[in-house]
Image (spheres, helix red, strand yellow):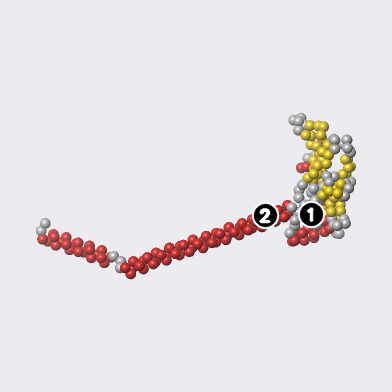
Amino acid sequence: MNKDSIIGFIVIAAILVGYSVWMTPSQEEMEARQRKIDSISMVRQQHQLLDSVRMAAEIKRIEESVAAETVRTESTATGVAQPDNFTQLKERFGAFATAALGTDSTWVVENEVFELTVNAKGGVINKVVLKDYQTWDSLPLVIFDPNNIDFNLSFFSRNRNINTNELYFQPYLNGFPYDGSKRLDASNTDSLTFSMRLMADNGMGQLD
């Protein structure tokens, strides 16, 4: 290696060292760059926090809405009407507004021959089972199909058309709650009564 080559390598090395030193950021530049990175990171964290807060608020709103709807559903199922709903019932049914509140329940009336299932809504007999008979596959013989029954009495009360299939009855016997007569209370003094009489040991009965 001659002198010129050595000088060339030295010049190249000097250029590389100088370029590296020149391109290396100063302490101030490094601090400024770090501040920029920190600022970007902080902004991202703030956005994530805001998104989390919004999501939590939305979840809370949905939970409160579901809880309120559940309360309304349970109130309706137990026959407890909200003030606005009862006002609407009062407008629709008048003196029978209270009877428009109830639950879909049934009770059984029977004698030695058959068993009747009565629905509280409408006070209708929706099932009759003959005790001494069975179907070909040894199942109880049901002679009433609730899907094919449409029992309703329509009448006017204070210029309002009232249908019994929209109202809920309560069972009474001689004025006391019992599985027998079905009475629909309209007010403290008024009521609509379906009276059922069954003979003890035959298939005869009477509905008034």
Determine crowd level at label 1: few under 14, some 14-19, many 20+ residues with C-alpha closer than 10 A: many
> Residue 100, which numbered label?
1
Residue 132 lies, in percent from the top left, at 82, 32
Point 81% across, 32% down: residue: 133
User: What is the residue that sits farthest to the bottom in this orientation?
Assistant: 28
Q: Residue at x 81, y 34 (%)?
A: 131
Question: Which residue shows up at 55% across the image and 59% down it?
Answer: 55
Q: Which residue is mark 2?
A: 70
Residue 138 drawn at (x, y percent): 76, 30
Say which mark, if any, is on residue 114. Answer: none
- Identify residue type, mark 1: Ala
Q: Which residue is at 89% across, 38% downward? A: 199
**In the image, is 19 to the left or to the right of 190?**
left
67 left or right of 49 in image:
right
Q: How far, Cα to Cα, is label 2 from label 1?
A: 21 Å
Place of residue 190 in the rendered image (x, y in percent of width and height, measured from the top left): 87, 55
